[in-house]
Image (spheres, rainbow, N blue to C red):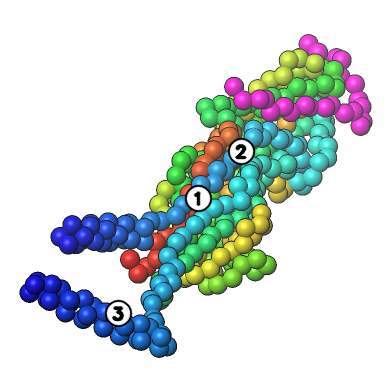
Amino acid sequence: MTFMKTSLIKLCLLFLLIMQLTVLNSQVWTAGDNITLQVSEFALIETNHAPVHLELSTSTPGSAVSSVSNSDLFVKISSIVPGGTDREVTARISSGSVPSGTTLTLASAACTTTNSGGALGTPEPNPIVLSNIDQLLVRYIATCYTGTGYNDGYQMTFTWSPLNPATNYSQIAAATYNITVVFTLTAHDGN
Amino acid sequence: MKKILTFIMVITTITSLYQPAFAQDDATANQELTMGIPEVLLIDAVNDAGVVGAVSLELTTVTAGTAISGGTGTSYAQVSSIVASGQTRTITAAVTGVPAGTALSVTTTVPSNANQAGTVGTGTSNVPLINAAAASTIVSGIGSCYTGTSSGDGYQLDWIWDAGAAGDYGSIVATTGSTATVVLTITAGV
């Protein structure tokens, strides 16, 4: 009997609580929620894969072979960096080597403007002499994109010349040489 | 509760490991270059003024009783050469039109001035050039080189024209404007 009495009291209290909640629920309440917006940093780089063919030759008896240039290659990037940081584009020879008696240089133009946006950086003012060590081509690249067209991005000019011909010319040998240049978009400098 | 805490800690650890690895990645792109140096063999003959033209030679004498002599002149062979690794070339000379009873020879001096560079080879002295005979080698051991294109640049060819063998002296006749043609050839690399 005592048990039934206690249960009855509990039931009454529960009923009162439900009633109270119903009353509360009829009022207007606002609720907040956290929405997280995230932009991950990323770095993507690709070339237009233009065939780059260079040939040293001359057609004048008595003259040295002439320098030759090729500007068919464009490098495209997409970059997002944390605030206040930037990246660089570097280049080096990853396979093959520049033939004896010659030198191969590379210069980057400023990024094309047609389909690009953002902080596209600044090309180095002087061409680099390509070697198997990474060298800076473009500095101060932050958040940007270059466009994806065949002629979008940083136009690269390769120049191949006899190296100090007065002393090295006899080292030049007729042949075909294949070289692979690797372009790197570095991690941002905030790392 | 303990399981939930453990789960959260595992997720947090994986996330914190993943983020720095992503941030440190460089991105790269490869580009192949094809670089060709074809063989080059170009030769040109110029006179001492540096232009294409005949070299005038004259045989005569002013001393009674002596044979005619003194037909000398100079021209230059200007060359551009690129050889394959380990190859060398030669320059040969062949002649037609040398007047009967006379003899033509040539001394070749390799270039050494500031306008040339590379492996210019070795010259020769007093190589006789016989009418319609097989070509004679006048320079050997040419590698990759260039001689320059100005007047006085190139292999110096000193021509010597004299009376031939004594037995042939009787066949010499006076002539003016007779032309002998020397063909200079730079050979393919061997």
Tell whether label 2 touches label 3 (CB within 8 Å). Answer: no
Q: Position of residue B169 (x, y in %)?
A: 82, 16
Categorize mark 2 by other alpha carbons within 10 Å: few (<14), some (14-19), many (20+): some
Secondary-structure class at tag 3: helix
Task: Name the subunit of mark 3.
Answer: A
| Relative side of A44 to B47, left or right | left
The residue at 81%/34% (across/down) is: B57
- The residue carrying mark 3 is A18
Residue A162 appearing in the image: yes
Cα distance, mark 3 to mark 2? 89 Å
Identity of the residue drawn at 83% across and 33% down:
B58
Name above or below for residue B72 compared with residue A7.
above
Identify the residue at the far front of this view: A1
Mark before the other along the chain sequence, 2 or 1: 1
Numbered disc total: 3
Label 2 belongs to which residue?
Answer: B36
